[in-house]
Image (cartoon, helix red, strand yellow):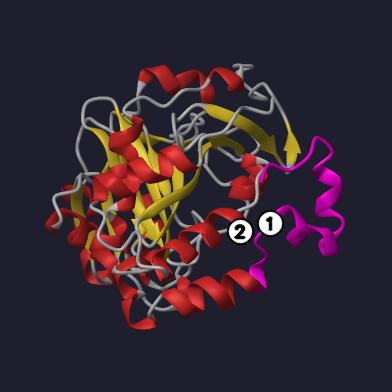
Amino acid sequence: MMLKANWLQWLRLPSKLSQQGVLGMNQRNHSYIGRYNDRRLYPLVDNKLKTKQIALQAGAKVPELIGVIHNQAEVRQLKKLIPETSGFVIKPAQGSGGKGIMVITHQEGGRFFKPSGAEVSSADLERHVSNILAGLFSLGGKNDVALIESLIEFDDRLLKFSYEGVPDIRVVVFHGFPVMAMMRCSTAASDGKANLHQGAVGVGLDIASGRAVNAVQFDHPIRHHPDTQADLSALQVDNWTELLQLASSAWEMTRLGYVGTDIVLDKTRGPMILELNARPGLAIQIANACGLLPRLNYIEQQLESGKLNALSLQERVSFSQQLFQREACF
């Protein structure tokens, strides 16, 4: 169900949200995460290193892993691990919400530079890795390991839709069926990170075609990117069916019934799995101006009747594309 034109008022009236098909946090936790996600499987997605391993085993494409720092003694080996000329990313294996991710876009004479142009020293890099190991950015504050990955060269056609950062695509997958998707585009307000709570733009995407249907920043509808001024209604993701199949394969990889798959589009390698999330957020509904509940309920009913249980990955994606096609509401 698409929210009405004055949909922002519904956000202020919780009693009306369910009438519009909006999934709330309590219902998500109880009826979907708690019911369909076996907690014993959480380590597969809470640990980005394990996620990368199961994705590679399944034949999925992921960003190249350059190296792993396991303990403080190995921090001194950081300089040997990082590439001498190209950019790279340092991130915690068990981080959440984009915390602890440091992106280095280029180097000059032993100096490192972030997307904003700010300079970072070798000592800063080592300090950041030490903080990751100490659990500063990790779920529950547990000791962690630091991953060093190659920098994603995102598709030039998406360049105008993001500012100083790589846009990613979140797909909510329910029992292997893609039910809703959005692109998260970084802004100056979000400091180049694709985090909606920090000010990134969320662009709702039509499951059938991969074209933009709505866009928001700080929960308010917008049409143009606040920094690049690009018309967000013109956004169209290429190779969309391939991307949905990759996202939906998270069901085969993890057996988690309700999961968020984060995809990035590399210029040469195409769609790649960035990470998986067993507790995907609900802001995707605001980005789409559309509630999740009708889609989840329909898939649930069909599964309970046994009508969809034997579908292949390709058939599941095709089914969702036919069922959830919609018009833009810019």
* Residue numbers of the magenta segment: 1-26
Front-most of residues 248 and 44: 248
Front-most of residues 149 and 181: 181
Q: Above or below — where is 277 with respect to 289?
A: below
Circles 2 and 1 in contact, beta carbons < 8 Å: yes
Front-most of residues 12 and 76: 12
Label 2, on which residue?
A: 293
Q: Does residue 154 belong to the magenta stretch? A: no
The residue at 42%/45% (across/down) is 320
Q: Above or below — where is 272 with respect to 328?
A: below
Q: Secondary structure at mark 1?
A: loop
Q: In the displayed structure, does residue 185 sit left or right of residue 176?
A: right
Q: Amino acid at mark 1?
A: Val
Instruction: Determine the image quadrant of residue 309.
Output: bottom left
Q: Position of residue 158 (x, y in %)?
A: 44, 22
Front-most of residues 55 and 117: 55
Label 1, on which residue?
A: 22
Q: Position of residue 192 (x, y in %)?
A: 53, 36
Q: Position of residue 91 (x, y in %)?
A: 37, 55
Instruction: Determine the image quadrant of residue 215.
Output: top right
Instruction: Determine the image quadrant of residue 307.
Output: bottom left
The residue at 40%/48% (across/down) is 262
Q: Position of residue 23 (x, y in %)?
A: 65, 61
Q: Mark 2, residues whose alpha carbon is within 10 Å: few (<14), some, or many (≥20)?
A: many
Q: Secondary structure at mark 2?
A: helix
